Amino acid sequence: MTVETPSPTNTPERAAVAAGAQEWLETLQSWVRIPSVSADPDHHADVAASARFLAGELRAKGFPEVKVLDEGPWLPAVLAHWPSGDPAAVRVVVYGHHDVQPADGVERWTHPPFEPRIIDGILHGRGASDDKGNIAMHLLGLSAHLSATGRTAPAVDLTMLVEGEEESGSPHILELLQAYRSELDADLVVVSDTGIFGPETPSVCIGMRGLVAGEIHVHGPDIDLHSGSFGGAVPNPIAELSRILAALHDDDRHVAVTGFYDDVVDPTEAERAATAALPFDERAWISGPAASRVPAGEAGWTTLERVGARPTAEINGIWGGYTGPGNKTIVPTDAYAKLTFRLVGRQDPATIQKLVTDFVQATARPGVEVEIHWEGSGVAPLYVDTTHPATTATRRALGLAFDTDEVLMTREGGSGPEAELAGVIGAPLVFLGVMTDADQIHAPNESASVPLLLKGCEAVAHLWRELAELGRAGLE
Ligand SMILES: [Zn+2]
């Protein structure tokens, strides 16, 4: 797991990042102030404003070609190019997103979500980390690269693609990529929307899980019935739904859907050993970011494996019948649940949707109508080639920024459009992001560590130099 890095301490990249930090932090805070919540139509004008803000910053940085992509079914995205001037240069597409998760439950925010401020080296605000902070790293990182190398254009052909609806599941990413495919020729895709293992333990992500999401609807009687006159004599849709949901896992918490594990690829013994060697404090994780009492998951696997290397079935919400004050003695008409499945290995979203649909129909008992509606076509899992020179270069770049030659490789439990990106662009993919569990992304009180963001900026600057040194031939 060790990569060779020269002793860094005071590189010109670090000095340039330090010199630009103050102004950059003000820019990032201005960006966080724009509530670009893609899930909420009331905020779609803000998503557009956020795209224009980023486009303006990229132009100010020197990108000669910058456009806001706002003619299509997607929410505004930003596409920018800065050629290196060398026709043989490595071509890189950087991907991330400028939309943010909703900030609902404002009363649970210690600091208002869209009034960013820095307290004790922590930038508070929705998007501070996911993903404005991690995309903004490319602004200062690029300046640092130019100033450290004395260049007037980047040493790699740089394309930035920053979409505006990732937090809504990137519903149009395939169309967007296809519409602008001719401008996305690349030797490498760099995704900046992930994290590191911990503040003292930099790592690169080497895998993201796939995802399918659906909703089950169980319909019983056509009208709410008196539970005294009819209850016990007709099927109750909530009881039937509960039975189906309970059948999703066996007593060992394996997913019980027939065929579910057929295309799972188990981690190798070497990977299991490497995962077991990570400095992971399970107790601190459970009581800290996991905010739970005990670890619980599929038997035979560790907590880190459960959130990175194993597929899951999760029940996200359940409703139906009467939930108001007091009692209402009814047999209700309908029951609903929302489900998501995280996928790994070669699990195919369409196949999983079919297997789950079949399982639900086979488990349902006669007397109720059961429908399952899938949200879009889902996303496939993605794995990084850990032996690819670009992966090594990314680890070296992070190692330089963190003053260490120990840059780990970890899997993330989350999902994004990376498989589509790598597939459409047809290039290998690496992850460069510095989020940590402390950032509380998607939750109230999102924040980002300023020192970590600045290390991320520095890593960006190192990466462009490293890739230019490798050259296109070195990436094959
Ligand atoms: Zn994100």
Image: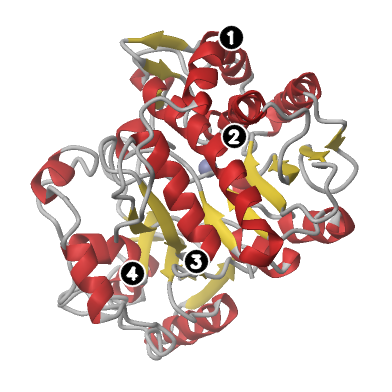
Determine contact: label 1, label 4, CB under 8 Å.
Answer: no
Residue behind mark 4? 309
Name the side, left or right, on which 134 lies relative to 423. left
Determine the CA span between mark 1 and mark 3. Answer: 34 Å
Residue behind mark 1? 23
SS of the residue under disc 4: loop
- The residue type indicated by label 1 comes to Glu
Disc 2 C-beta below 8 A from ligand 1: no
From this viewpoint, is residue 252 visible? yes
Which of marks 4 and 2 precedes in the sequence? 2
Which of marks 3 and 1 precedes in the sequence? 1
Residue 175 in percent (x, y) is at: 81, 59
> Dot 4 surroundings within 10 Å: few (below 14), some, or many (20 or more)?
many
Question: Eyeballing the image, is 248 above or below 102?
Answer: below
> In percent of the image, x 29 and y 74: which residue is there?
243
Name the side, left or right, on which 310 lies relative to 303. right
Question: Eyeballing the image, is 165 above or below 389?
Answer: above
> Dot 2 surroundings within 10 Å: few (below 14), some, or many (20 or more)?
many
Which of marks 4 and 1 precedes in the sequence? 1
Determine the CA span between mark 4 and mark 3. Answer: 13 Å
Choose mark 1 or mark 2, whichever is in front.
Answer: 1
Image quadrant occupied by the N terminus: bottom left
Determine the CA span between mark 1 and mark 4. Answer: 40 Å
Residue 374 in percent (x, y) is at: 58, 68
Residue behind mark 2? 135
Observer-nearest residue: 118 or 364? 118
- The residue type indicated by label 4 comes to Ala
Determine the CA span between mark 1 and mark 2. Answer: 16 Å
